[in-house]
Amino acid sequence: MDLDVKSIMLVGVLLSLFTVLLLAQASQGFPPERRRHLRLWTVGLLMQPVAWSLLAATGSLPEVFSLTVGNGLLLLGFAEMARAMRGFVGLPERRLAYWLLIVVTVLLIALFAGVWPHYSARVVVNALCAAVLVGSIALALRPSFRRGGFTAARLTGAFAAFGVVVLAWRFTTHVLEPRVAGNLLDAGPADFAVVTYACVGVVFLSLGFVLMHTERAYEDLRKLASLDPLTGVLTRSGLAENGHRLLSEARRYRRPLAVLLMDMDQFKQVNDSLGHAAGDAVLRHLAERARRVLRGEDVLGRLGGDEFVAMLPSTDAAGARVVAERLRDALREAHALYRGEEVPVDLSIGVAEAGPDESLEALMQRADHAMYGAKRAGGNRVGLAPAP
């Protein structure tokens, strides 16, 4: 077993060094604001080969030194990885808490290595601390399972949870069958499993972390492509995606869903008389005023030109009409400004409530007909579409 454990350690050293180079190269492909957590993870990973080299040298170096420093670096590496993961998902990194835990653990390992030598006591303390750190990675990724998050996050979280199970096995083994004498090179099955996981498994965790960054980058690009660059609201494709989702949820939970289709009455005159820059200012102003009126769960988008759409979940036609009037009032009370001058623009709005089996296209078409009905009636008013 002596040779097997040292072989695994050697493989762990080589894989860790290779993965450090891979992470350093991969981080260059991400925006600067995305690199911090990868760098933090890389620093933690870089401690692994040093730690395993010290632990493998037990017997050649003073035992207290190799055990204390080796285990300390190994745990500190996992702590930095846990910090990186928590920071990546938007949680507090808890640096001081992790470092304090490691200091206490290292002092206990030194105590059971030099003052009161006891192999199983060292293992129990080490396994408990490592389980907390690896478990922090798994817990940080738990929301990805509940909300159907990124695939890489679910796989990485599952692999971290598996590490906790392996560490619990080792912890339980040494609690139930304590050994005063022994070392890592004289490993039992649970010890060997933990060494294998810590040496080889950390590479899989690292690759999962890189994939999580890649998936987030693609998600950012997808969101960017679904936003109108002028107004910051959803584009036509983003509206379609959200509209199908909201319509599906409305049917599933039997809740109403209403659509407002908005069109400015004098937009062409603004462009013709003041220029397209003034028209752009008016469009941005309408989007900004609409955001103030709408709720957080409402969806706002731009179909094109001066046509905007608001989707109101859990809102019937009567409630949507009230919201539409508020939008008109908000635009009338605060005109757009262009070069210090007010640019008043009226708004016609069509309101339609989704039918039980109505498609998104049919719903939008009814709202469009209601909006043009409001324009034909003189504009600057709200038109209500009849039920389908």
Image: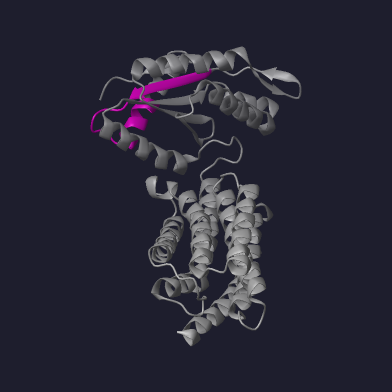
Q: Position of residue 154 (x, y in %)?
A: 42, 56
In the rendered structure, the answer to whether residue 371 lies left or right of residue 273 reads left
Check residue 94 for magenta coloring. Answer: no
Viewer can see residue 218: yes
Nearest the viewer among 345 and 301 is: 301
Q: Position of residue 270 (x, y in %)?
A: 63, 25
Q: Which residues are magenta?
A: 347-368
Q: Position of residue 81 (x, y in %)?
A: 58, 59
Nearest the viewer among 91 and 103 is: 103
- Label total for image: 0
In the rendered structure, the answer to whether residue 325 lies left or right of residue 54 reads left
Q: Position of residue 359 (x, y in %)?
A: 29, 36
Nearest the viewer among 4 and 159 is: 4
| Quarter containing the N terminus | bottom left
Name the residue located 67 percent from the left edge and 77 percent from the top edge.
62
In the rendered structure, the answer to whether residue 369 lies left or right of residue 9 reads left
Kindly give the residue lying farthest to the right in the view shown. 340
Kindly give the residue lying farthest to the left in the view shown. 357
| Quarter containing the C terminus | top left
Name the residue located 67 percent from the left edge and 72 percent from the top edge.
65
When the figure is inspected, residue 244 is found, relative to residue 225, above or below; the finding is above
Name the residue located 67 percent from the left edge and 80 percent from the top edge.
61
Kindly give the residue lying farthest to the front in the view shown. 116
Image quarter for residue 159? bottom left
When the figure is inspected, residue 254 is found, relative to residue 172, above or below; the finding is above
Nearest the viewer among 173 and 302 is: 173
